[in-house]
């Protein structure tokens, strides 16, 4: 298969940070995205949340460590950080800050965080092992590094509509073209082993959309993202037409309204102890 070439100006992050994407990401919470390490949280802890997006998880974590704790949310997108700061102001959460930054070269004191967390980040990076090593630099000795990533190859959905299948193929191809790995969930243990860090938990949990409300939301959200995000730009760079995108969006909405609809999205999860 030929590797598509993306013109300059197309964001390397395959989802983009347009309003359609940020609105979808804002539905993520500590409960639905971080359950695997919530029992490790204590009042007063310092947490670094990398790839924080619009900050919904970050703010939940801040509330859990309390007013004596501190959480720093970092994202490379200024749009995402702007949305996160607005959410923090709206919720009135104290002890949290948001900043634009590069995961590999943050302006923070080394070994200064109790927990370093990254949700749906490693899958987008060309060198996830290097990213884990960077996370270890920011983490205190004995502190925890927690990562969670989806595994696209293990996704399953019903009914199988052509536009949804085309969406899947198009997304995975564009993600890999910039060095990402959509099947990251199954690789987390291997990446952590390559760093020499001590794994204390390796497991998985899923997002499942199987109620009328959930499938309608998921279908409509994905349809909006097909048409109004970086996905569309990258799809066109692969040779897809606006008509192809309309078919994807139509089939996502159709799928979402089907009384038999089911979407199963597994995630790999990992906790390692910093040495």
Image (spheres, rainbow, N blue to C red):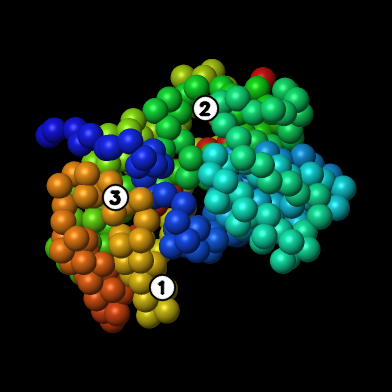
Q: Residue at x 50, y 63 (%)?
A: 23
* Up/down of 178 relative to 265, above or below: above
Tag 1, which secondary structure? helix
Mark found first going from the N terminus, 3 or 2: 2
In this view, the mark in front (1 or 3) = 3
Q: Give the quarter of the figure containing the N terminus.
A: top left
Tag 3, which secondary structure? helix
Q: CA distance from mark 3 to mark 2?
A: 27 Å
What percent of the width, then of the height, locates residue 112? Answer: 76, 29
Residue position marked by numbered label 2 in the rendering: 131
Mark found first going from the N terminus, 1 or 3: 1
Residue position marked by numbered label 1 in the rendering: 217
Badge 1: how crowded within 10 Å, few (<14), some, or many (20+)? some
Residue position marked by numbered label 3 in the rendering: 233
In this view, the mark in front (3 or 2) = 3
Badge 3: how crowded within 10 Å, few (<14), some, or many (20+)? many
Mark found first going from the N terminus, 2 or 1: 2
* Up/down of 104 relative to 210, above or below: above
* Up/down of 136 relative to 266, above or below: above
Image position of 217 (left or right of 104): left
Residue 2, picture quadrant: top left
Q: CA distance from mark 1 to mark 3?
A: 23 Å
């Amino acid at each position: 298969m030929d590797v598509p070439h993306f013109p300059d100006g197309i964001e390397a992050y395959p989802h983009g940070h347009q309003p359609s994407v940020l609105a979808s990401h804002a539905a993520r919470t500590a409960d639905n995205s971080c359950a695997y390490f919530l029992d490790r949280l204590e009042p007063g802890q310092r947490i670094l949340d990398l790839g924080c997006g619009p900050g919904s998880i970050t703010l939940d974590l801040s509330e859990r460590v309390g007013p004596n704790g501190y959480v720093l949310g970092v994202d490379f997108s200024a749009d995402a950080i702007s949305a996160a700061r607005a959410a923090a102001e709206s919720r009135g959460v104290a002890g949290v800050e948001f900043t634009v930054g590069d995961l590999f070269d943050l302006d923070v004191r080394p070994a200064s965080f109790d927990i370093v967390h990254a949700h749906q980040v490693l899958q987008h990076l060309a060198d996830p092992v290097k990213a884990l090593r960077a996370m270890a630099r920011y983490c205190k000795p004995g502190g925890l590094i927690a990562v969670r990533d989806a595994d696209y190859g293990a996704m399953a959905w019903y009914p199988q509509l052509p536009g949804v299948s085309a969406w899947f193929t198009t997304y995975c191809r564009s993600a890999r073209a910039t060095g990402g790995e959509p099947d990251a969930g199954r690789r987390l243990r291997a990446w952590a082993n390559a760093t020499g860090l001590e794994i204390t938990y390796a497991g998985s949990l899923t997002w499942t959309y199987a109620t009328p409300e959930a499938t309608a939301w998921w279908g409509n959200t994905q349809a909006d993202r097909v048409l109004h995000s970086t996905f569309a730009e990258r799809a066109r760079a692969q040779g897809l037409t606006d008509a192809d995108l309309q078919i994807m969006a139509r089939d996502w909405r159709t799928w979402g309204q089907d009384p038999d609809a089911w979407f199963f999205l597994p995630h790999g999860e990992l906790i390692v102890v910093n040495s």
